[in-house]
Image (spheres, grey):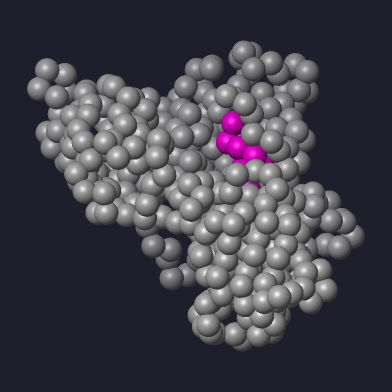
Amino acid sequence: MNTLRRRVAALLLGPCLLCAAAATPAPAPADEPKYPPLKVDPSAFGKNIQRTMRLLATSTPDQRNTVRVLFYGQSITEQKWADAVAADLRKRFPHADLVIENRALGGFASQYLVKTAETDLYPFEPDLLVFHVYGAHDKYEDVVRRVRERTTAEVLQQTDHLTRPEDFTEETDPKKLPPKGEHWNAFMNHNWLPAVSRKYGTELCDQRALWKQYLTANKLEPKALLRDAVHLNAHGEFLMGECVKAYLRYDPKLGPSPAEEWVKTLAVGTDVKWGDGKLRVEFEGTRVDAICTPGAKGGVPAAVTIDGKKPSEFPGTFAMTRALAKPGGKWPVVAGFGWEKPPVVEEWTMEVKKDAADPKVFGFTLSGSVTGPDGAGRSDKRFVSNSGRVAIDPAHWQVEYALALAGVKPVPDAFTVRWKVVSHAIDAVVAPAAGTALTLARGLPPGKHVLEITGGPDTPVAALRVHRPPLAAEKK
């Protein structure tokens, strides 16, 4: 990594005030300044996110499609451009049931996000992931690969914006940009990110090229759009929002995106039919949703089984939320958890104390709201709780760094950590109070399954939607 890249990394990775400040941007002024528009021909943009855009564009008052959008990255993604993009989607597609979240973590480069994605990204299973992060190139690819292994999300990959005058004349020939060369930024933007996009079929939002075009057209230097060495000022936030919005377009001329093959909708009455009081379908995938009849509310619960079991009996349908400390912030002090025996829905509490002999080591006791007291351990040793419902790898502890980003220095002698186990499965169909999409199970083991819903033609299920991730998981 060259000297400049180290400086950028220091801004983005270190426990710095810049990252913490970017996490909670100041309120926008009442009168937003006017900036020169981004002039670009978007006709070739958006090919690989057309499923998401089709769902948005075809939503009507009578058929409101649910669309899940996740912004993920670090402090750049925390900035106000993402709010502008979200507001634009809601304005352009008022009849879609949009579920939009921004789970970016300022200061967390790819080396950290590859761990936190286990709680933040894959369980959310977005229809569209908007993704940008600095850091190690191989960990960046790991995140994108696992999105393809575990979800059917379409991905909008963002290249880096410009930060230096010399970026205008940087090398762009990927053959001249090896990973161990001196031009790291150029390598990432002109070699690695495009290669990852081609390999995994993502949509590459080349905002680096758009940035160069915009700055040149308006006779601006990169610093005119920055508030420090890397973070955006209001003008930069405007431009990044415009770059992303240019790609979020529905255009039937582009043809279907690859995700149309990964997600299949089966209409009840034509593709699948009721018989003997059951709706039975064989499918291959890791997630299945029920699309309820528009306007239906409540009703008699219709029992659901998958492979003869309740959906909630599949361990993979459980997920754990971020492990947050008090005092602390939104940065998890433990990057993720495993288990050796199936978890249950509950809230976990960990009481943590510094080790008397080594302040970088922590001892703790663990208790679950359902499980009860569940053992004690140390951060420097692998821990498996007495019930087997919680396992912690020593490499996942990141207390000092996470608390520093939240402004908690030094690390307290004692603190409390809490997280939850949530279920992404339901055992009966009841029409939702809002929207029409109802996830029956996500996180199923890859492969073939048999779904049965016990009910009848009056059960408010209009369709079933099956999700099959396109990539088999790498063997460990």
Is 61 displayed left or right of 355 in the figure? Answer: right
Q: Is residue 113 above or below residue 419?
A: above
x and y, in percent, of residue 163 in the image: 56, 35
Query: Does residue 199 show up?
Result: yes
Specify the farthest residue to the front. Answer: 276
Majority secondary structure of magenta residues: helix
Based on the displayed image, in which of its 4 quarters is residue 441 positioned? Answer: bottom right
Q: Position of residue 325 (x, y in %)?
A: 25, 44
Q: Is residue 472 above or below residue 28?
A: above
Give the residue at x 72% y 55%.
283
Residue 239 visible within the image = no
The quarter of the picture where the C terminus appears is top right
**13 up-or-down from 286: above or below:** above
Give the magenta part as a residue range.
Answer: 142-152
Question: Outermost residue, left direction?
Answer: 356
Q: Vertical placement of 284 versus 455: above or below?
A: above
Viewer-nearest residue: 227 or 71: 71
Q: Residue at x 69, y 82 (%)?
A: 457
Is 143 colored magenta in this rendering?
yes
Q: Quadrant of residue 141?
A: top right
In the rendered image, which quarter is residue 381 located in?
A: top left
Q: How many marks?
A: 0
